[in-house]
Amino acid sequence: MTYDLLEVTVPVAPLRAEPSDRSEMVSQMLAGERCKLLQRGEKDWIQVELVADSYRGWCDSKQLTAWSSEKEQTSSCHFVLMQAPISFWLLQEGAQCVIPAGARLACDLNGSWWLGSQRLEPLTALDACFTPCASPLEAALNFLGAPYLWGGKTTLGIDCSGLIQLAFTLCGKHLPRDASAQVSCGAAVAWESRAPGDLAFFSNEQGAVVHVGILASDQTILHAAGEVRLDRLDAQGIQKEGLHTHQLHSMRRVGESGSAQVEL
C-alpha cells in the first residue's frame, strides 16, 4: 500500500527550519494533524508540508506514522477537534499525556478514543474537551496568560500568529500560519469601524507586518507578547505603561468573528 500522508502521533511535534534539533522551531504540529512527505534527510529527519495550511518544515519521523487515503475513506472512526486549551488523557500502557487545543482525536463506534494506533482514556470531562467556542475571540481569551514561545501553538507556549490561527481553527475557519500572510485574509476595516473580533496587524520600521492580535473591545487588544495578554489599543498602536510598543499597520475582519467586549 502506498502512503501519501503522515499523521502526528505525539501531543505536540516541533516543526523546524532545518533538519536539526538545534534549528529554529518555526511552528508546531498538533496531535492528529496530517502532513505530506516532501523529502527525506539524514537519520530520522523528514521535510513535510501540513495539509491544513501548507506550512513546511523539518521534523523527526519518529513522531509521525503513515496514513493512507484509503484508511481515511474506510475508517469507522470519526475525528473530533480538541477545544479545551489543555486536557489530560491516559495512554493504554498507563502513562498520562496532555492533549492541546487544535489536536484531532479519533473516536470509534465503541466510543473508544485513539491517537494513531494508541488508545486513550479521557481524564478530563469530554464536555470540557470538545465544547466549541462561540467565536475566535472567545477561543483566544481562553489562552490568557499562556507564555510566549516563538513557533508555539499551545497554551504551554504560543506566538502571536499561532494564537490567531488556532483561535480561528477552533471555530472552523482556516488562516495561514504567519502574520505576514494573515494580513491578506478577510476585508480591510477602517479604524472608525473597528469591532471586537477584528484582527489588528503591526509593522516594523521597514513597514513589514511582524505582529498580530485580536480586538477584545474597541480599546483593547489580546495578543501574545511575553505572554497572551490584554493591552490598550489606539490609532497609533499598542500601549503598555504609557508607551507605544507596536505600530498599527492595518485591521482586517475575517467573517463574523466578534463576541462580548472585554475591557481592561
Image: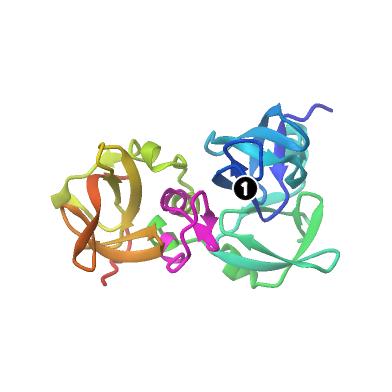
**Horizontal and vertical percent for residue 50?**
59, 37
Q: Residue furthest front?
A: 22
Which residue is painted at 49% across and 56% down in the image? 149
Residue shown at 55% from the left, 43% from the top = 24
Q: Position of residue 136 (x, y in %)?
A: 41, 56
Q: Amino acid at mark 1?
A: Pro
Q: Is residue 218 visible?
A: no
Depth check: give the residue in front, 180 or 168. Answer: 180
Taking depth in this image into account, of 217 and 255 the one nearest to the observer is 217
Q: In the rendered view of the protein, which quadrant contains the C terminus?
A: bottom left
The colour scheme applied to this rendered structure is: rainbow
- Residue 110 location, x and y as percent? 80, 59
Residue receiving disc 1: 14
Q: Is residue 161 magenta?
A: yes
Residue shown at 65%/32% (left/top)? 47
Tell me the SS state at disc 1.
Answer: strand
> Residue drawn 38% across and 59% down?
225
- The quadrant where residue 137 appears: bottom left
Residue 171, placed above or below residue 209:
below
- Look at the picture and state if 252 lies above or below 5: below
Callout 1 crowding tier (Cα within 10 Å): few <14, some 14–19, many ≥20: many
17 and 232: which is toward the camera: 17
Residue 60 horizontal side relative to residue 160, left or right: right
> Percent position (x, y) of residue 51?
59, 36
Residue 105 sits inside the magenta stretch: no
Magenta-colored span: 140-165
Q: Is residue 244 visible?
A: yes
The quarter of the image holding the N terminus is top right
